[in-house]
C-alpha cells in the first residue's frame, strides 16, 4: 500500500478541524458511527448522498445505489440484528422486510436525536489524507472541509461485480443480461425464461421470485453451498448457539449436525454438493428456494459455459433458450473518494485493516461495517464505532505499526484457511468470534494507554 501525499497547501488543521470527524454515509453503519459520536459529545458531520437514512435498505433510494428489491426480507433475525440499546419493535416479524428495517433505522436516528448532524443529498467526492495528519474532504457541492478523522461507512454492496471475464458469446446473446443490483421488482421477470447465476442470497431470492412470475426459472451455479432454512426446529436459525461466549469450534459442529438433519444433502434438491463444510462460506439462507426446487419450479443447472444466440449453454452441455440472465455474482468493495494509489481494493476486494477497521499507516482513518459477517452487521458496527470513539478520546491506543501489520497478515492467513477461496470472502468474519475480538481489543487498547501513561510518568520523573 502506498502512502498518499496530498497536493493541498493546507498542511496544518485548526484545532477545531482536528477534533472534528467526517462520517461518510448514513446507512446502517454510518448512523451507528454518528450516534456514538453524538453521545460522546464529539464534533462530527455525516454526509449522505440520499435524502434519507438507511442506505441499502431503502427500496428505490434516491441515492441510486441501493441493492434492495421489493420482495427483500433480511436474513438475520430480529434479536441478532437489533442495536444493543434500541430493540426492534416486537410487532415486527422475526425476519423483517426492507421497509420495516429502513423505518427502524429512521426511528433510531430520531430516538437518539442526531438527524441535524446528517447533511443529506450530499456526497463525499474526495478524501485526501494530509501529510501532517488530518484529511481534506471535498464534497459534491464543491465545498472543501478539513477533518482530523474520517469514518468510512459507504457500504460494500453497491458496486456490482459482473462475471470477469464475460462468458463467451455474451456480447451476441439475444436475451437481456443484468446484475442483481438492477433487479427491483417481479415485473422484470413476468413471462420470461430466466437464468439466475450464483448461489448467494441474491440468487436465492431472485430465483424464488422468478419461480412465481417467470415462464421458466433456472438456477445456475459453479459451486454448491449449504442452504440454511430461516427456521430450524422452530427457532430462527441464527439464535441456535449464537452467543459470543460459545467458541466457534463448539458452535459450528453443532450447527452442522442440525442443518444436515434439517435439510439433508443438497443433491436431494438437484444442486451440486458443496466442496466445503458448513460455515466455510458466507451463509446462503432460504427456506423458500428449497421448496421451489422441490416443486420443480426452479431448475438447477451447473455454471454457464457460453451463450449461443438466445441459448444459454451450461457446463454439462445442456442448453436452454432464455430471455433474461440475472448475474447474482456479488459486489466489489469500492471507495470512489480515495485516490487509487492510496487505497484501491481493486478487483480482488482486498483491504488491509488492523482488526478490520483501522488503517495501519494513516491515523484517524476508520472503516465501519467493512466486514461480511456470518451474522448481522449492525451490532458489529456499533462495537466498532465505540472502539473508534474510544480511540478519539484517548481511551484506546493502537499497537505499533509492525504489530498491526503482523495481525493483518495473520488474519489474512486465517481467512484463507477457513473460507472457500472467493472474492466474496476477503472481508468475511464470524459474527460472534469477531464481536469477542472487538471486546478484548478494547481492553487491550485501554491497557496500552495505561502502559504509555506509566511510561511517560517514569520519563518525566
Ligand atoms: N435477504 C437478505 O438479507 C439478502 C442479503 N444479501 C447479502 O448481500 C451480500 C451480497 O450477496 P449476493 O449478491 O448474493 O453476492 P455473493 O457475493 O454473496 O454471492 C455471489 C455468488 O456468485 C457466484 N459467482 C461470482 N462470480 C461468478 C462467476 N464469474 N461465475 C459464476 N458464479 C459466480 C459466487 O460463487 P463463489 O462462491 O464460487 O465465488 C456466489 O455464489 C451478501 O452479504 C448477502 O448475504 C443479498 C441478498 C438478500
Image (tube, rainbow, N blue to C red):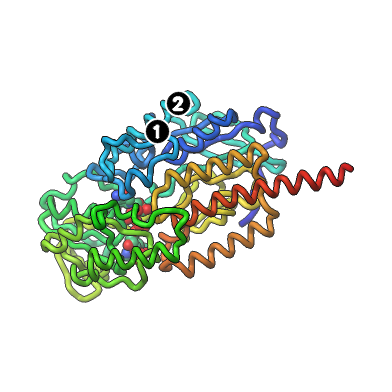
Task: Note whether 338 is above or below 229 in the view shown.
Answer: above
428 vs 217, nearest the viewer: 428
In front of the other: 195 or 140: 195
Instruction: In the displayed orientation, state which residue is furthest to the right.
Output: 461
Near mark 1 (Cα within 10 A), the count class, few <14, some 14-19 or many ≥20, is many
Beta carbon of the mark 2 residue lies under 8 A of ligand 1:
no
Secondary structure category for the residue under label 2: helix
Question: In the rendered view of the protein, which quadrant contains the C terminus?
Answer: top right
> Which residue is labeled 1 in the image?
53
Is residue 241 or residue 58 the one in the foreground?
A: 241
Across and down, in percent, residue 357 comes to 55, 49
Decide if residue 147 is on the left or right side of residue 279.
right
In the rendered structure, are the residues bearing label 2 and label 1 in contact, judged by CB atoms less than 8 Å apart? yes
Q: Ligand 1 falls in which quarter?
A: bottom left
Q: Which residue in the structure is indicated by mark 2?
A: 115
Mark 1, secondary structure of its residue: loop
Residue 275 in the image: state x and y as whole percent. Answer: 34, 73
Instruction: Look at the image and tell me in which quarter the N terminus lies.
Output: bottom right
Image point 53% across, 41% down: which residue? 385
Q: Is residue 179 above or below residue 315?
A: above
Please report the residue visible at 36 percent of the width from the left and 70 percent of the height from the top: 277
Amino acid at each position: 500500500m502506498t502512502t498518499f501525499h496530498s497536493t493541498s497547501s493546507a498542511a496544518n488543521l485548526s484545532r477545531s478541524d482536528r477534533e472534528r470527524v467526517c462520517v461518510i454515509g448514513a446507512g446502517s453503519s454510518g448512523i451507528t458511527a454518528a450516534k456514538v459520536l453524538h453521545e460522546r459529545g464529539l464534533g462530527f458531520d455525516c454526509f449522505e448522498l440520499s435524502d434519507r437514512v438507511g442506505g441499502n435498505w431503502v427500496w428505490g433510494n434516491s441515492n441510486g445505489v441501493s441493492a434492495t428489491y421489493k420482495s427483500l426480507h433480511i436474513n438475520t433475525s430480529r434479536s441478532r440484528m437489533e442495536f444493543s440499546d434500541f430493540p426492534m419493535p416486537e410487532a415486527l416479524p422475526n425476519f423483517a422486510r426492507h421497509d420495516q428495517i429502513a423505518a427502524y433505522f429512521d426511528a433510531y436516528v430520531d430516538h437518539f436525536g442526531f438527524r441535524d448532524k446528517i447533511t443529506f443529498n450530499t456526497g463525499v467526492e474526495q478524501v485526501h489524507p494530509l501529510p501532517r495528519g488530518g484529511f481534506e474532504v471535498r464534497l459534491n457541492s464543491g465545498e472543501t472541509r478539513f477533518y482530523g478523522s474520517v469514518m468510512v461507512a459507504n457500504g460494500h454492496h453497491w458496486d456490482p461485480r459482473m462475471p470477469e471475464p464475460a462468458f463467451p458469446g455474451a456480447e451476441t446473446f439475444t436475451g437481456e443480461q443484468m446484475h442483481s443490483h438492477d433487479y427491483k421488482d417481479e415485473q422484470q421477470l413476468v413471462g420470461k425464461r430466466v437464468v439466475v447465476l450464483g448461489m448467494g442470497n441474491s440468487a436465492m431470492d431472485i430465483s424464488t421470485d422468478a419461480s412465481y412470475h417467470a415462464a421458466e426459472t433456472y438456477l445456475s451455479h459453479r459451486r454448491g453451498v449449504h442452504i440454511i432454512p430461516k427456521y430450524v426446529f422452530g427457532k430462527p436459525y441464527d439464535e441456535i448457539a449464537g452467543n459470543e461466549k460459545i467458541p466457534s469450534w463448539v458452535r459450528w459442529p453443532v450447527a452442522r449436525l442440525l442443518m444436515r438433519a434439517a435439510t439433508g444433502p443438497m443433491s436431494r434438491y438437484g444442486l451440486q454438493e458443496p466442496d466445503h463444510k458448513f460455515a466455510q462460506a458466507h451463509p446462503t439462507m432460504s427456506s423458500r428456494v428449497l421448496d421451489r426446487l422441490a416443486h420443480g419450479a426452479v431448475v438447477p443447472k451447473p455454471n454457464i459455459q457460453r451463450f449461443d444466440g438466445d441459448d444459454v449453454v451450461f457446463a454439462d452441455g445442456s442448453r436452454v433458450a432464455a430471455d433474461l440472465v440475472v448475474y447474482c455474482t456479488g459486489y466489489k468493495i469500492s471507495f470512489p473518494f480515495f485516490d487509487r494509489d492510496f487505497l484501491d481494493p481493486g478487483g480482488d476486494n482486498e483491504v488491509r485493516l488492523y482488526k478490520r477497521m483501522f488503517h495501519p499507516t494513516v491515523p484517524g482513518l476508520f472503516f465501519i461495517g467493512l466486514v461480511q459477517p456470518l451474522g448481522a452487521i449492525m451490532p458489529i458496527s456499533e462495537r466498532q464505532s465505540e472502539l473508534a470513539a474510544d480511540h478519539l478520546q484517548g481511551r484506546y491506543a493502537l499497537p505499533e505499526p509492525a504489530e498491526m501489520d503482523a495481525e493483518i497478515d495473520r488474519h489474512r492467513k486465517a481467512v484463507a484457511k477457513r473460507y472457500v477461496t472467493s472474492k466474496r470472502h476477503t472481508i468475511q468474519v464470524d459474527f460472534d468470534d469477531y464481536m469477542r475480538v472487538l471486546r478484548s481489543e478494547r481492553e487491550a487498547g485501554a491497557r496500552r494507554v495505561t502502559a504509555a501513561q506509566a511510561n511517560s510518568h517514569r520519563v518525566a520523573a
